[in-house]
Image: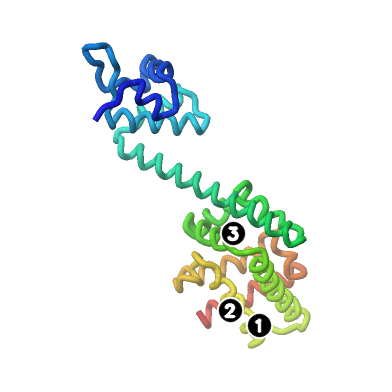
């Protein structure tokens, strides 16, 4: 199967002049030129044009596109990379759609939209950190889970988290030991809370990685200034860390 230059231009949404220019600069040659002088393009050429148009849409210049195509040893590898990039773009757009729906839902309910949710897909603040610690899949699954919730469900989840923090702060003020039964009950509650987040090791029953994650979170509460004050002060953060560490040593 072949298309003439006019047929390809019409289907690709470009001009015949553009296709001729791509030929002149070495980006896309016709598959063959007929005796009548017409340019013909086969499926391989169309697949190459698809790659070129995608990279143009990303804002790449023709010299940069030429370098990418020249470095590709296998056409299938290039198409796989194309698919991966499209899937990433699709996921970004889906996050933006969920964000816009959240804002609309909040405004219709007369509530103030949550700033972080409104900007989801535009600025996912913790994406790089989560991926570096736990991998791309954990971020993607947990992020989709969170942004798939309704406004009321998100509020309920945040309230449960705030209730857990308040219980930890109360335990610190009560002066109990991190290894006490009361503190260990709170640690178990903390781990159950984590296990309700899809994609995390605790949700998937991966014992070794769950222990690693819980210990890592405990350390983060102490070491990261963004979280230390969450439990009142540095002493409170150390209490939560020590209780979680004790829990992973004896009960996980």
- Tell me the number on the disc at residue 246: 2
* Real-space CA distance between mark 3 and mark 2, rounded to the nearest whole angstrom: 33 Å
Nearer mark to the viewer, of 1 and 2: 1
**Element type at mark 2:** helix
Mark found first going from the N terminus, 1 or 3: 3
| Rendering coords of residue 208 (x, y %) | 45, 71
Q: How crowded is mark 1: few (under 14 residues within 10 Å), some or many (20 or more)?
A: many
**Element type at mark 3:** helix
| Rendering coords of residue 210 (x, y %) | 50, 71
Question: To which residue does mark 3 refer?
Answer: 147
Task: Judge whether 206 appears above or below 101 on screen.
Answer: below
Q: Residues within 10 Å of mark 3 (few under 14, many from 20)?
A: many
Task: Judge whether 119 appears above or below 178 on screen.
Answer: above
| Rendering coords of residue 157 (x, y %) | 65, 70
Write the residue at 36% across / 17% down.
23
Q: Tell me how many marks there are.
A: 3
Mark found first going from the N terminus, 1 or 2: 1
Question: To which residue does mark 1 refer?
Answer: 183
Nearer mark to the viewer, of 3 and 2: 3
Is the Cβ of the residue at disc 1 closer than 8 Å to that at disc 2?
A: yes
Task: Judge whether 113 appears above or below 90 on screen.
Answer: below
**From this viewpoint, which residue is outermost toward the top?**
36
Q: Which of 130 and 251 is in front in this view?
A: 130
Residue 17 lies in what quarter of the image? Answer: top left
Write the residue at 72% across / 79% down.
167
Q: Can residue 153 be seen in this view?
A: yes
């Amino acid at each position: 199967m072949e298309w003439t230059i006019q047929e390809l231009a019409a289907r690709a949404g470009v001009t015949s002049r553009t296709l001729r220019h791509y030929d002149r600069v070495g980006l896309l040659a016709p598959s063959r030129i007929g005796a009548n002088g017409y340019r013909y393009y086969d499926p391989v050429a169309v697949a190459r044009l698809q790659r070129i148009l995608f990279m143009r849409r990303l804002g790449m210049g023709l010299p940069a596109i030429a370098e990418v195509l020249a470095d590709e040893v296998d056409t299938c590898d290039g198409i796989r990379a194309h698919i991966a990039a499209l899937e990433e773009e699709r996921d970004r757009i889906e996050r933006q759609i969920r964000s816009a729906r959240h804002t609309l839902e909040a405004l219709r309910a007369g509530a103030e939209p949550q700033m972080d949710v409104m900007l989801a897909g535009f600025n996912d603040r913790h994406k790089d950190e989560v991926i570096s610690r736990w991998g791309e899949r954990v971020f993607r699954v947990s992020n989709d889970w969170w942004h798939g919730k309704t406004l009321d469900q998100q509020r309920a989840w945040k309230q449960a988290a705030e209730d857990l923090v308040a219980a930890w702060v109360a335990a610190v003020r009560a002066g109990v030991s991190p290894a006490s039964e009361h503190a260990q009950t709170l640690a178990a509650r903390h781990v159950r809370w984590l296990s309700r987040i899809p994609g995390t090791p605790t949700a998937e029953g991966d014992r070794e990685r769950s222990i690693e994650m819980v210990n890592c979170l405990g350390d983060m509460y102490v070491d990261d200034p963004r979280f230390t004050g969450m439990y009142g002060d540095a002493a409170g953060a150390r209490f939560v860390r020590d209780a979680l560490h004790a829990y992973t040593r004896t009960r996980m």
